[in-house]
Image: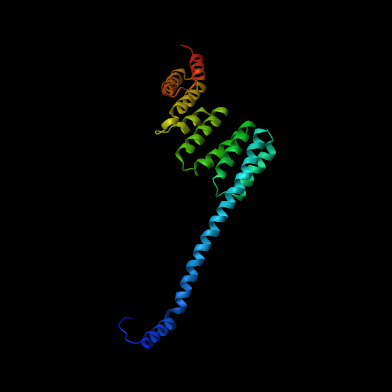
Amino acid sequence: MDGYTTEDEQVELLKKWWAENGKSAIFGVVLGLAAIFGWREWQIYKLTQIESASIIYEQALKASKESKIVEAKDKANAILSNYANTGYAVFARLILAHLATEEADYVTAEKQLTDLLGTVDDASLKHEVTLRLARVHLANDKADQALAVLNISDTGAFSPVYNELKGDAYAQQNKPDEARQAYQQAILESQSSASDLSLLNLKLDALGK
């Protein structure tokens, strides 16, 4: 507007700009505000979902510890039904798998853990679920499936546990040499962490010479 020499000309230019662009400018501001407040509402909704799921999870965990099986299952399933998009759905499945194992319902436990493996991204949690699934297979006398689950190249800090469970699987298959090797590897890997090796040594001694 600096190129115009009179205030009247500047006013006329503003009127013309407003006639041509005023509505779209207001719409842009309104849209921007809606996006901001919409995002805030979404964040509040997510936070509410997480808080609600957290309360139900604590109730499920408490019921599980007190052996209130029906209540624990109901609470865990409520999380899966209503809060499946929260992180508590992972822990709900772990509770259901644990309860199923306690009842020797290995089919249900296996399904819960297998389904969970397909959704977990966190490496440590994935190892935890894998190890639990291997234990379920061993409890169900399925050493072959346990070894298949444990056949992972990058086991990281969980390597001693992987090797211990491999030893259990080989022992279940009546393969003492393979079991001994796996237990010895687990003991070797555990020494630097000051872990209690008494159970591993008992398992190793049980194999004989």
Query: Which residue is rendered at x = 43% and y = 29% of the image?
Result: 159
In the picture, the quarter occupied by the N terminus is bottom left
Indicate the quadrant where residue 182 lies.
top left
Q: Which residue lies furthest to the left in this view?
A: 3
Query: Which residue is rendered at x = 47% and y = 71% of the image?
Result: 29
Q: Residue furthest top?
A: 209
Residue 38 placement, left or right of 177: right
Residue 105 placement, left or right of 29: right
The image position of residue 198, as x and y in percent, is: 51, 17
Task: Name the one closer to the observer, 114 or 53.
Answer: 53
Is 1 rendered above or below residue 92? below
The image position of residue 10, as x and y in percent, is: 37, 84
Residue 1 placement, left or right of 168: left
Indicate the quadrant where residue 69 lies.
top right
Total marks shown come to: 0
Residue 16 placement, left or right of 34: left
The image position of residue 184, as x and y in percent, is: 43, 19
Task: Name the one closer to the observer, 42 or 155.
Answer: 42
Is 52 rendered above or below residue 200? below
The image position of residue 15, as x and y in percent, is: 42, 84
Indicate the quadrant where residue 110 lies.
top right
